Image (cartoon, rainbow, N blue to C red):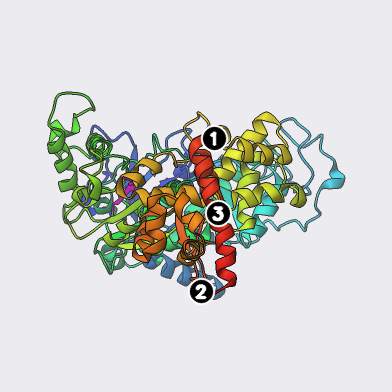
């Protein structure tokens, strides 16, 4: 019989199989097969074309050895299209009413030897905590650890389960872990490895036939039959779903190609990504502000600000990893300087699909002769194409104040490097709070004690006792980078909690600025602040000799009023902010703009983080430390007298 040949535009349903046996089962479900079509030279996939009911279908199989690697995070995949969910609901209703055609579809496989039950032998399920003894079968495993179950009858109807499927990037081979994860996720039907790499790339429904128990036991006699039967059942179920969906409904769904047209493969190359401890409140804020919305395509800008080391980059990287499939492309840009930003934008040009930017831009590489500004404009124009509207641009580490361009040649206005179009999502991480004016803002704050312990444990590699760690965790006060560095140092050197706490007080610089690229980003603050306002820089240094949790203008004013000696021995900058509250407020505003200071909850004064407090002490030379220590002593003595008299 001559096979029909249809144009590619006539095929409206895609069916992706994970294994060759699943592809064979899917091919058996076709009502008719069609002639193959010519393929693009860049497309290495092999396709089977055909028809199921009123739908023209394309079948393909993942390449051998390929799995759909999921983001390294817990989270939910995209929901299937509504038309598929409706079909599943109707399928379940048909089963309740005894109107399912599943048995009829499965009968097709009776003629194929690999689907025969006769050669499969028995199938045993062992206790979750009992591991496989070795070998290709379970003959050496204890029969006393087999869970007793009622055998299924030969004619018993196949059961379809509906619920949560867990998709990961490694095979589940441990019964205890399987049960623990299932309970943690609210009851998981099965574990698999392909769906996460597909489902978020385009809308689809996942139907899996499972052939083992996700434990360490492997039965080589049973497994071929189980795999073939699982594939057949999944294929039959898929055909049943398709038979329910009207062809007109499929025509209304979003075309996958339109989403993939502007797709750029995801990459976080060069991004300093470490072990991430989940921060649900921060993560949810990013999701609310940045995830694409079909009803509202307007541009979304979120400025994430906070103290250096508080975890802004880690949070942004985790968001990009977790939701990469919600965006057609994710561009990670280095915002540490104007030149770095331009180079990272230009580097994206080579990843843009051919024909969408000038070829000279796609061929541009850093350091070569070429018009860098032209390449940057090309990429920004590409992001502004009207139907290229589901991208995410992350501009990380925008910490140079563009208002200081005269003093800092690397400072720039990040707004100049954002696409002009009113679509897409932009995430900016910065220590500069004024950048929040660009869009919505979210402050990343220190983590609570429970999460601080979790971060510490992740890097320390073992449990953390409540009593022994309290002093150190108090010193680090929920700053993720400081916690990570302390834990990693202690793990590598075997240093005890008490010893590290003592060294932290005595040798802050050596501990908190290791030569591994993960130093605390505080050294760059001092000169930048001093250039803008000398009083602000000096106030931060003086603060290191006072209580980090309580500074207010009245303290300085009271000291100045009550002690002529203190006034004579303090510097002009301190006298100025003590007598002039507006100058004090100006200095505090600058420190707050760098996320070094925050207002106390009761609004009676200001506080600075203990790590910043310690840093401000350790960057002082001996003469500074002596002068400021003396000044703070005189201030505190005079202030006590003054405050008593208020």
Compared to 267, does 93 lie above or below? Answer: below
Q: Quadrant of the N terminus?
A: top left
Foreground tag (3 vs 1): 3
Residue 509 numbered tag = 1
Q: CA distance from mark 2 to mark 1?
A: 68 Å
For this view, does 91 lie left or right of residue 50? Answer: right
Whether the magenta-drawn stretch holds residue 394 is answered as yes
Q: Residues within 10 Å of mark 3 (few under 14, many from 20)?
A: many
Whether the magenta-drawn stretch holds residue 468 is answered as no
For this view, does 567 lie left or right of residue 215? Answer: left
The residue at the far top in this view is: 368
Residue 69 numbered tag = none
Q: Residue at x 63, y 41 (%)?
A: 505
Q: Circle 2 sits on which residue?
A: 93
Q: Quadrant of the C terminus?
A: bottom right
**Which badge, 2 or 1, is on the more N-terminal residue?**
2
- Report the label total: 3
Residue 213 appears anywhere in the view: no
Q: CA distance from mark 3 to mark 1?
A: 28 Å
Q: Circle 3 sits on which residue?
A: 634
Q: Residues within 10 Å of mark 2 (few under 14, many from 20)?
A: few
Quadrant of the rendered structure where residue 185 is?
Answer: bottom right
Q: Nearer the viewer, residue 480 or 513?
A: 513
Q: Nearer the viewer, residue 65 or 89?
A: 65
Q: Position of residue 239 (x, y in %)?
A: 43, 58
Judged from the image, the secondary structure of the residue bearing numbered disc 3 is helix
Q: Position of residue 645 (x, y in %)?
A: 57, 73
Compared to 603, does 573 lie above or below? Answer: above
Q: Which residues are magenta?
A: 391-400
Foreground tag (2 vs 3): 3
């Amino acid at each position: 019989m001559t096979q029909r040949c249809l144009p590619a535009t006539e095929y409206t349903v895609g069916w992706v199989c994970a294994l060759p046996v699943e592809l064979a089962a899917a091919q058996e479900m076709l009502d008719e097969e069609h002639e193959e079509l010519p393929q693009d030279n860049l497309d290495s996939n092999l396709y089977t074309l055909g028809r199921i009911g009123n739908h023209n279908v394309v079948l393909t199989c993942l390449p051998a050895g390929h799995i759909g690697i999921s983001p390294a995070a817990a989270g939910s995949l995209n929901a299937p299209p509504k038309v598929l969910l409706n079909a599943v609901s109707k399928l379940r209703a048909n089963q309740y009413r005894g109107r399912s055609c599943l048995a009829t579809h499965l009968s097709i496989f009776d003629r194929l030897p690999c689907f025969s039950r006769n050669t499969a032998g028995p199938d045993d399920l062992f206790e979750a905590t009992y591991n496989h003894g070795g070998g290709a079968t379970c003959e050496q495993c204890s029969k006393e650890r087999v869970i007793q179950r009622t055998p299924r009858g030969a004619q018993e109807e196949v059961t379809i389960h509906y619920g949560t499927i867990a998709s990961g990037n490694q095979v589940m081979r441990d019964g205890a872990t399987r049960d623990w994860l299932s309970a943690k996720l609210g009851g998981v039907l099965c574990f698999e490895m392909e769906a996460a790499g597909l489902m978020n790339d385009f809308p689809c429904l996942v139907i899996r036939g499972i052939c083992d128990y996700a434990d360490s036991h492997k039965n080589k006699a049973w497994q071929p039959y189980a795999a073939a039967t699982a594939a057949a059942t999944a294929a039959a179920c898929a055909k049943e779903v398709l038979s329910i969906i009207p062809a007109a409904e499929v025509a209304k769904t979003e075309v996958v190609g339109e989403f993939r047209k502007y797709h750029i493969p995801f990459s976080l190359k060069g991004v300093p990504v470490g072990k991430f401890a989940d921060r649900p409140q921060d993560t949810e804020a990013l999701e609310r502000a940045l995830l694409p919305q079909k009803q509202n395509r307007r541009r979304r800008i979120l400025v994430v600000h906070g103290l250096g080391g508080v975890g802004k980059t880690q949070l942004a990287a985790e968001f990009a990893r977790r939701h990469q499939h919600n965006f057609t492309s994710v561009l990670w840009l280095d915002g540490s300087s104007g030149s770095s930003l331009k180079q990272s934008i230009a580097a994206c040009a080579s990843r843009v699909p051919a024909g969408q930017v000038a070829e000279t831009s796609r061929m541009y590489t850093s350091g070569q002769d070429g018009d860098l500004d032209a390449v940057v404009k090309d990429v920004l124009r590409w992001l502004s194409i009207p139907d290229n509207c589901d991208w995410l641009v992350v501009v990380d580490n925008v910490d140079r104040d563009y208002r200081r361009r005269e003093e800092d040649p690397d400072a720039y206005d990040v707004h100049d490097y954002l696409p002009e179009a009113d679509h897409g999502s932009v995430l900016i991480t910065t220590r500069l709070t004024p950048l929040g004016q660009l869009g919505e803002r979210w402050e990343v704050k220190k983590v609570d004690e429970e999460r601080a312990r979790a971060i510490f444990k992740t890097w320390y590699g073992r449990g953390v006792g409540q009593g022994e760690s309290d002093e150190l965790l108090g010193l680090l006060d929920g700053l993720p980078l400081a916690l990570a560095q302390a834990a990693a140092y202690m793990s590598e050197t075997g240093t005890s909690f008490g010893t590290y706490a003592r060294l932290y007080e005595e040798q802050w610089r050596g501990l908190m600025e290791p030569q591994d690229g993960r130093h605390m980003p505080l050294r760059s603050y001092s000169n930048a602040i001093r250039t803008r306002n000398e009083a602000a820089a000096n106030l931060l240094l003086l603060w290191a000799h006072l209580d980090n949790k309580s500074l207010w203008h009245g303290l300085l004013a009271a000291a100045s009023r009550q002690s002529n000696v203190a006034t004579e021995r303090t510097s002009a900058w301190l006298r100025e902010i003590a007598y002039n509250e507006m100058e004090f407020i100006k200095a505090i505003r600058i420190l707050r703009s760098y996320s070094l200071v925050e207002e106390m909850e009761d609004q009676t004064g200001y506080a600075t983080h203990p790590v910043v407090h310690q840093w401000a002490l350790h960057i002082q030379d001996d003469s500074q430390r002596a002068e400021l220590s003396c000044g703070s002593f005189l201030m505190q003595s005079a202030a006590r007298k003054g405050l008593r008299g208020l």
